[in-house]
Amino acid sequence: MNILILGSGQLARMMALAGYPLGLHVAAVDVNARNVVDPLTKLVSDKSLIQALVEADAISVEFEHIPQDLLEQVNATGKLKPSIESIMAGADRVKEKALLSGLNIANCPYKIVTDINQLDEAVVQLGEKLIIKASRDGYDGYGQWRLSSVTQLAELKLQLSELDLQKVPLVVEKMLCFERELSLVGVRSANGEIAYYPLAENLHHQGQLHVSVAPAPHVNEALNQQAQDVFNKLAHALGYVGVLAVEFFQMGDQLLVNEIAPRVHNSGHWSMQGADTCQFENHLRAISGLPLGATTVLKPTAMINIIGCDDFSKDILSIAGSHLHLYGKTVRAKRKMGHLNVSADSYAELGKTMQALAQYLPAEHFPMLKDEAARLA
Ligand code: ATP
Ligand code: MG
Ligand code: MG
């Protein structure tokens, strides 16, 4: 079977690796150049985009920010999974908020701003601590601004005055003091079968994911059920097929949705070592019409993103339970270069193993690692 993925980064790469043993051939589309590339070698194929669309048995995305005309062209093939509505809800925070509110799913208090002066009303409505998000094209914390005091408002308005808010509105959110961030990655097949990975606990730094631990410690049945109910509502409403990730903020015993990602997700990378079937394989199974694989956890696992550096000894692999996944990219600040997965028999052991890993890694690039390791150990 031929699978075509829109986007040619690390997520397409890891889907290609997972597809190989199943006899699924994964090709990728560079959505800027609009050509077909091999997701492993990045070599441009002599196949045209049209030809690849015709030959594909299923088409999916590794990224929600796909140019609209391309997304519509692909959708016209009838092979796109998940649905175009799912992808657009993930790509546009205004649509995403409407979806969540329409389904009565608890999310962060917000105001949509289409004129810069409405920021004053946002402060009145939501308070002076705000996180301001461009409604389109943001990821890893890009396209976000923070207001921590009303005294900064005039300057921020000046800074944002260049934006065309009629075209791309802002979604202004109350800055929440949550206890922690959790995410649910799950998968739905075309016949409605659903499998969930356990909630993962996610640690962010400057808007970017650094560490995930799965299963998240201290999750009771009620919290788990809340997360799965949200997943079910979204998956049913969207006629979803494939892997869907839902990011949550935990406030007391309530979960508020931060955002959704209509694709395989960084907070699911732990499943490559920590679960019976990884998220990449399960996504391919779902979109190919194959039975889903078990999401059973093998061992508590931590995923540590390697961000903005590649300079550490490969001797790190001498640590039992550690696995390295590099994406073959050149280093740039804030760029995700790869990740480490590490599993252990208990959380305490996992913490100790993470402490051992930290010895090999430049501390300035891994600001969350030591504290999280100490907390678990
Ligand atoms: P991603 O790479 O996950 O797609 P993104 O750029 O779309 O990221 P968000 O997930 O909206 O951005 O926000 C990034 C991070 O910023 C969150 O994981 C959280 O740590 C913080 N954040 C976002 N919204 C809020 C909020 N309303 N209150 C407090 N912190 C927030
Ligand atoms: Mg996002
Ligand atoms: Mg996010």
Image (tube, grey):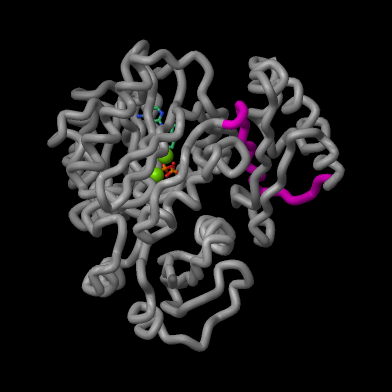
Q: Position of residue 32 (x, y in %)?
A: 43, 72
Q: Nearer the viewer, residue 20 or 330?
A: 20
Whether residue 342 appears in this view of the structure is yes
Quarter where residue 319 is shown: top right
User: On the rendering, which quadrant does ligand 3 occupy?
Assistant: top left
Residue 56 placement (x, y as % from top left): 38, 74
Q: For this view, does 255 lie left or right of residue 293? A: left
- The span shown in magenta is 298-313
Residue 357 in the figure: left or right of residue 12: right
**Residue lying farthest to the left in this orientation:** 102
Placement of 186 over or under 34, stated as above or below: above
Relative height, residue 7 to residue 269 (above, below): below
**Residue 150 visible at all:** no
Quarter of the picture containing the C terminus is: top right
- What residue sits 49% from the left and 66% below the top? 24
User: Magenta stretch: residue 21 in it?
Assistant: no
Q: Residue at x 25, y 74 (%)?
A: 77
The N terminus lies in quadrant: bottom left
Relative to 109, say whether 374 is above or below.
above
Foreground: 236 or 62?
236
Is residue 309 a member of the stretch shown in magenta?
yes
Q: Is residue 314 above or below residue 25?
A: above
**Rendered residue at 55%/68% (across/down):** 39
Percent x, y of residue 165: 23, 52
Q: Which residue is found at the position 27% from the left and 21% from the top?
A: 127
Quarter where residue 340 is shown: top right
Q: Residue 33 is drawn in which quadrant?
A: bottom left
